[in-house]
Amino acid sequence: MILGTGGTIAGASARATDNVGYRAGTVSVESLVSAVPALASKRLEAEQLAQLDSKDMDHATWARLARRVREHLDRPDVRGVVITHGTDTLEETAYLLQRVLAPTKPVVLTAAMRPATAMQADGPQNLLDAVAVAEAEGVQGVVAVVAGQVWSGLELRKSHSYRLDAFEAGPDAGPLAVVEEGVLRRFRDWPRGEALDVSVLPPDAADWPWVEVLASHAGADARALDAWRSAGLKGLVLACTGNGTMNQALEAPVRALKDAGVPVWRTTRCAQGAIVGADDEPASALSPWAARIELTLALLRKR
Ligand code: SIN
């Protein structure tokens, strides 16, 4: 089952030489599949779930996507689900789907750094590789396949703004596998865990708690936090400096948030590593974006 959600893989530009000035989420998922002749002999169904630039991914679409993936996975004739997605928030969607579905069948997200109209588009190969992973024996869980590498949905992070191999895994992890000429070479175990269930995700975005990420930085100013607290913020993830420290200007407003019962979780804004010596911090080894999802899920489960 191939579900289309948009992204650069479905992007289009008027000029084949243009790798950046395109419109994401333009080409239909059926067209993406039919652009790969090697997929013609396979038994595939394609469904357009959304047509977004993934910078605009939203909670209601996530709720719809998770439910639709669950429905397809429950079909005995479906071996796996491939999702075409933008690279920009791929890691967030992958993290959410793994935590909610923890599927025993493969759910393979794929994407591209160049639009479908580019002279050397990377989308067709990535889609072919994603189908190869979904078909391979024993694969399970939510993974992402880009530029021949297979990443855990719980670990991947976009780490480059332009390169075709734009992803890495954190903290301090590598790919789970590589795809070489349609053959999988695996290094580590597939993602596993307990599924929270799609029922945890409200279909209406208005029912999701408001959880923000704030980075600590030189010259930090407390006013944003005070404004968020007054406006009803429900949870905060701090992208802290280094090993989990924050600018002193943020200390008082963070304390005020905690005193008001708003959970505040610390992560590091460093591209790699975890907050060492902070085992009591629920998100010490997560990226700020994964932590935001984890905190959102924790709040949703309390309702
Ligand atoms: C997007 O995330 O939808 C646009 C950028 C990309 O896919 O690389």
Image (cartoon, rainbow, N blue to C red):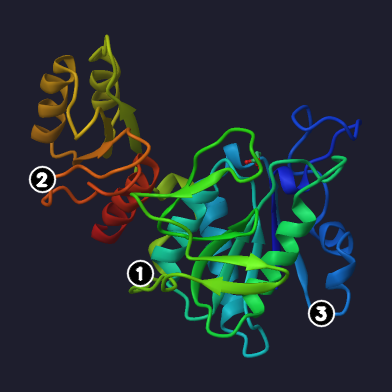
The amino acid on which the numbered mark 2 sits, given as a three-letter code, is: Gly
Marks 3, 1: nearer the viewer: 3
Relative image position of residue 118 (x, y in whole percent): 84, 40
Q: Is residue 236 above or below residue 72?
A: above
Marks 1, 2: nearer the viewer: 2
Q: Which residue is mark 2?
A: 277
Q: Which residue is mark 1?
A: 196
Mark 2 packing: few (<14 Cα in 10 Å), some, or many (20+)? few
Q: Quadrant of residue 23?
A: top right
Q: Which residue is mark 3?
A: 42
Task: Give the SS element for disc 3.
Answer: loop
Quadrant hosting ligand 1: top right
Task: Give the SS element for disc 1.
Answer: loop
Relative image position of residue 247 (x, y in whole percent): 19, 18
Q: Are marks 1 and 2 in contact (CB under 8 Å)?
A: no
Q: Earlier in the sequence, mark 1 or mark 2?
A: 1
The amino acid on which the numbered mark 3 sits, given as a three-letter code, is: Lys
Quadrant of the rendering where the C terminus is positioned: bottom left
Q: Is residue 285 above or below residue 183?
A: above
Residue 210 left/right relative to 254 = right
Q: Earlier in the sequence, mark 3 or mark 1?
A: 3
Q: Is residue 116 above or below residue 242?
A: below
